[in-house]
Amino acid sequence: MENYLIDTHAHIDMIEEPVDKIIGEMNQNGVKKVIIPSVEEKTFDKILKIAHSHENIFAMTGIYPSEAAAYSPELESRMEEICKDSKIKAIGEIGLDYYWDKSFVELQKEVFRKQIQFANKMSLPIVVHDREAHKDTFDILKETDKGEKVLFHCFSGSVEFMRECTKQGWYIALGGVVTFKNAVKMKEVAKEVPLDKLVLETDSPYLTPVPYRGKPNKPAYVKYVAEEIAAIRGIAYDELAAITTHNAERFFNI
């Protein structure tokens, strides 16, 4: 069977193109499956509608760190209902972001803990947003998660931090940043990450890889991430595609 790629993190709902066009370009570039993360409640219905528009699109539900103030028992009840949908494959993206605003760090931590507990209750994997909050993210996951799978989306830590995460059995997702000329740290992570814990993503429409850097990102462009990592590792593109696809299918049960 021909090897194909999976984009494990693409905000298709934020891409200003028809879904059929996005899917068509994916297929032409060997990308067969994609997972849409959730950011805020008002997009839940849109994300699910897109996921149901094609058999190979899946979704997550969760609240992004910057939206922590919106989290409530009522919202969690709605998420519980949404989790009954077979297209929902993870809780995400959830976590901590100390880059934009540090004025409500404690609330972010509290909501992160609640959503980890919710993921455990739903028996669903956890997709983590961690920006400039590595230690707190690690500590809260280690304290709170009761055995569900964990994936660090758009990993931005050091090789040492990556090793601490994979030692816990957690997965690492790398995207377009690894193709940037000056992204030395991410290239080092790509070289050293255990292959059985690596998946690929775009974070579309953001973080577009070379050669399209500066333009809106698309799931089709995950192939450039795969090409770069294969070159860094000194392995065949098809081998990297097969490994990362198997990892993604195992993690998300798709």
Image (tube, helix red, strand yellow):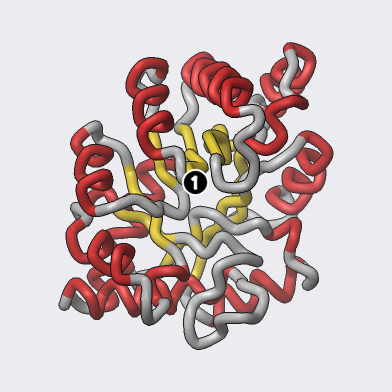
**Amino acid type assigned to the residue bearing label 1 in the image:** Arg
Q: Is residue 144 left or right of residue 194?
A: right
Q: Quadrant of the N terminus?
A: bottom left
Near-viewer residue (149 or 139):
139
Near-viewer residue (253 or 234):
234
The residue at the point 61 percent across, 72 percent down is 217
Location of mark 1 (residue): 131
Find residue 184 and report its horizontal and vertical position in percent.
Answer: 30, 70
Near-viewer residue (25 or 158):
158
Asked if 241 appears above or below 142 in the picture, the reply is below
Asked if 201 appears above or below 148 in the picture, the reply is below
- Crowd class of label 1 (few under 14; some 14 to 19; many from 20; radius 10 Å): some
State whether residue 86 appears in this view: no
Asked if 230 appears above or below 98 in the picture, the reply is below
Asked if 112 appears above or below 199 in the picture, the reply is above
Q: Is residue 196 left or right of residue 43?
A: left
Q: Is residue 202 left or right of residue 237?
A: right
Q: Is residue 68 left or right of residue 5?
A: right
The residue at the point 47 percent across, 42 percent down is 130
Determine the residue located farthest toward the front in the rendered image: 103
User: How many numbered discs, if any?
Assistant: 1
State whether residue 55 appears in this view: yes
Q: Secondary structure at mark 1?
A: strand
The residue at the point 46 percent across, 45 percent down is 132
Find residue 171 and report its horizontal and vertical position in percent.
Answer: 33, 44
